[in-house]
Image (cartoon, rainbow, N blue to C red):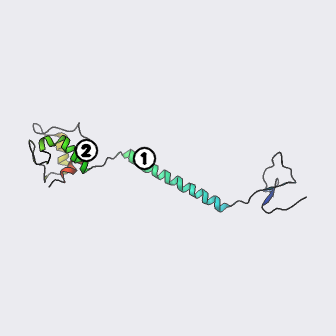
Amino acid sequence: MNRTVPGARPCGGKGGTSRSASESCGELRLVPPRDTTALRNQFMKKLICAAAILAAASITNAQMLTNAPVVSVKVGRALFLKNCAHCHGADAHGDDGPDLHDLDWTDKEISDRIRKGKKGQMTSFAGKLKTTEIESIVAYLRTLK
């Protein structure tokens, strides 16, 4: 008995599927038609997800590679109170050290003074403070008016 079933392909021959041991040539195997649109949509969703994950990973890796700490006025104030206030006063108006309000020095000059100090007048902080910590202190000093 040979019936034609829509969507069915013969078990062997042109365009057919391979036969298993339980199939014989006379049987028809029902194979659903392929929906290429659904497959394409599914593939695109997976591709977009993979691209988003890779993009997020590359941003995170770039941040880790640059290891760029952020200069912060808040951090600068905390560092100033811990390291500088005993000479310059908690309000930076001076005590043993000079008043630090309205400095007419460049940021580089201030950074260099903090880093190198001044013989007989100011301790060097080169080994104690990191570059970004010094930059944070400079950012804090710039807020003093």
Whether tag 2 and tag 1 are in contact, CB under 8 A, the answer is: no
- Taking depth in this image into account, of 83 and 17 the one nearest to the observer is 83
Classify residue 7 by image quadrant.
Answer: bottom right
Dot 2 or dot 1: first in sequence order is 1
Q: Residue at x 76, y 56 (%)?
A: 31
Q: Which mark is residue 44?
A: none
**Quarter placement of the C terminus:** bottom left
SS at circle 2: helix
Does the image show residue 135? no
**How far, Cα to Cα, is label 2 from label 1?**
23 Å
Alpha-carbon neighbours of circle 2 within 10 Å: few (<14), some, or many (≥20)? Answer: many
The picture places residue 65, in percent across and down from the top left corner, at 39, 45
Q: Residue at x 58, y 58 (%)?
A: 44
**Quarter placement of the N terminus:** bottom right
Q: Which mark is residue 61?
A: 1
Q: Residue at x 10, y 48 (%)?
A: 93
Question: Total label count?
Answer: 2
The picture places residue 110, in percent across and down from the top left corner, at 17, 47
Q: Residue at x 78, y 52 (%)?
A: 17
The picture places residue 118, in percent across and down from the top left corner, at 13, 40
Does the image show residue 36? yes
The picture places residue 55, in percent across and down from the top left corner, at 47, 53
- Looking at the picture, which amino acid does disc 1 mark? Asn
Alpha-carbon neighbours of circle 1 within 10 Å: few (<14), some, or many (≥20)? Answer: few
Residue identified by numbered label 2: 133
**Residue at far right of view:** 1
SS at circle 1: helix
- Looking at the picture, which amino acid does disc 2 mark? Glu
**Residue at far front of view:** 90
